[in-house]
Amino acid sequence: MEKGKEQHSSLLTRAMLKAMALFSGSQGITILCSIVRTKLVAMWLGQAGVGLFAVLSNALEMLNTTTNLGIRQSSVRDIAQSRAGEGHFDAAVTASAVRRWSVWLGVGGALLTIALSPLLSLFSFKSTEWAWALCAMAVAVLLMALTNGRQAVLQGTSQLRRLAAVTIAGAVGGLVVSVPMFYFWRMDSVVPSIIAYAAAVAAAAWMWRDRTLPAVKLAAAKAWQVGRQFIIMGAYMTGGAVATTVAGYVLVSWLNGAAGLDATGIYQSANIIVNKYAGVVLTALGMEFYPRLAGVAHSHLRTRVHVSQELNVAVTVIVPVAMLLVMLRGPVVSLLYTSEFGDALPVILWAAPGIVARTVSWIMAFVMLARADGRMYIVTETLSAMLSVVLAIAGYRLAGLPGLGMAYTAWYVAYAVIVAVVYRLRYRLSVSRWALASVAGGAVLIAAIVATEAAGLHSLSWVLTAVTAGAALTRLRRLWQSK
């Protein structure tokens, strides 16, 4: 029995690490492109340019999230189940419905963007002079919707290599097109470069689209019938995602009004570094974990095993990653931005523990999606969004920019507690003792590195980081090799 458990654990670990290797590579290339892009923006457009990117990018994300109705995530579950013969419709029919819905949602989102552009400009910039820029974002909203549909089909059919290729090609193509815009147009390049990036990713998604399922011509009524289930679930997911995105938009807009574009640029630079750095691991794991978890969601025991294993591996990886970010935050900020962004360093330092808390909450929250518990998902996400804004504003007022980093950690710790309560009380699920030990050990280690760095004990911090990284590699090797 124990041998069987170890064998199963080894298979799960290998699947996770293979997905992590694949998507960490593609994310690494994406981040490299982002480094070049952000560096050029910081050099040629300055803090004001970074701040303008922050406001417009958050507006675009909010519009895309609102109008996309969660199709990127919700349809993956339906496609995977249809492909396994457990869905209500054939996999080809489901995939065709997803693509049809992505067109409808994209057109609707573009029209809504045009209609709301004056109001969004007034809210973000206290005037309507940027309405034209937000109106132009309608093109990006349409392109992103089309991309989301194609990516969902690739993930649902487990074509992870094609999905990674879309990410790489889109990032490289977007950078190549944007560089001359930054150089020649400076501040006027912000809007065209955002649209160009969306176009590059959309083109890549079309080139590496799914070719395993035959295209099925569906009447509008049939597409509506097939898509009704994933759209209903997606609507709940959208409610939660909109709450989070709107919270980010409100916070950035508030910070812009309270402290100006320069402070907004500092915050955004730190936020991008923390979220994208952790996102490399989380995105890589999620691509493989979500469809797998959805397939066993009906079983309490198997769900517990998968969540426990995911927590064990994810925390083992993310803790040394977060510690390295703390130790290398100076060179990272210098590489990505300029010396003017030095105020981002304490923000990153105090936000580092939040990376671990975010990983824990992220894994357990997937159970809600796998079980299609839309109501609970929207409740927890809305509560989380409200906490993020309240804590960030309080943190900034009490401690300035470093307070935003502290607020980030407090936010994800609180959210992890909320999700853990739902996981335990609503679903009657638990995690294994070794998973709990991994989480507790990770929390202690990341707290220790922040404490030693804050105290100026850099040598001790490096020793602690090196020992942790070595222990993590040894543990992962043992899990991989177990028979």
Image: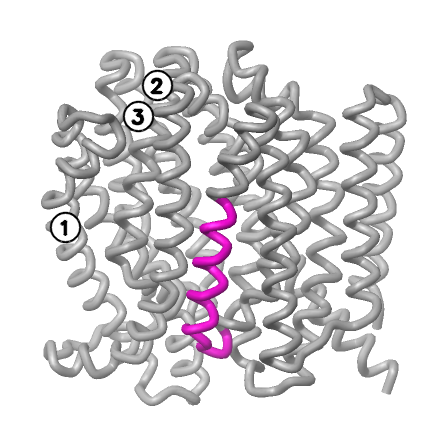
Q: Which mark is residue 49?
A: 2
- Residue under label 1: 112
Question: Label 3: which residue?
Answer: 178
Question: 81 or 420: which is nearer to us?
Answer: 420
Task: Give percent across and percent down for residue 100.
Answer: 19, 68
Colouring of the image:
one colour
Mark 2 / mark 1, whichever is N-terminal? 2
Residue 431 part of the magenta-drawn span: no
Amino acid at pointer 2: Gly
Magenta stretch, residue numbers: 370-388
Main SS category, magenta section:
helix
Residue 349, labelled with which disc?
Answer: none
User: Can residue 258 be seen in the rendering of this structure?
Assistant: yes
In three-dimensional space, the C-alpha distance between marks 3 and 1, rounded to whole angstroms, equals 26 Å
Q: Is residue 118 above or below residue 165?
A: above
Q: Nearer the viewer, mark 2 or mark 3?
A: 2
Residue 183's place in the image compared with 391, above or below, is: above
Q: Secondary structure at mark 3?
A: helix
Name the spot of residue 187 as percent of width and height, x first. 26, 16
Q: Nearer the viewer, residue 196 or 54?
A: 54
Work out which quarter of the rendered image holds the N terminus and state it. Answer: bottom right
In this rendering, the count of numbered labels is 3
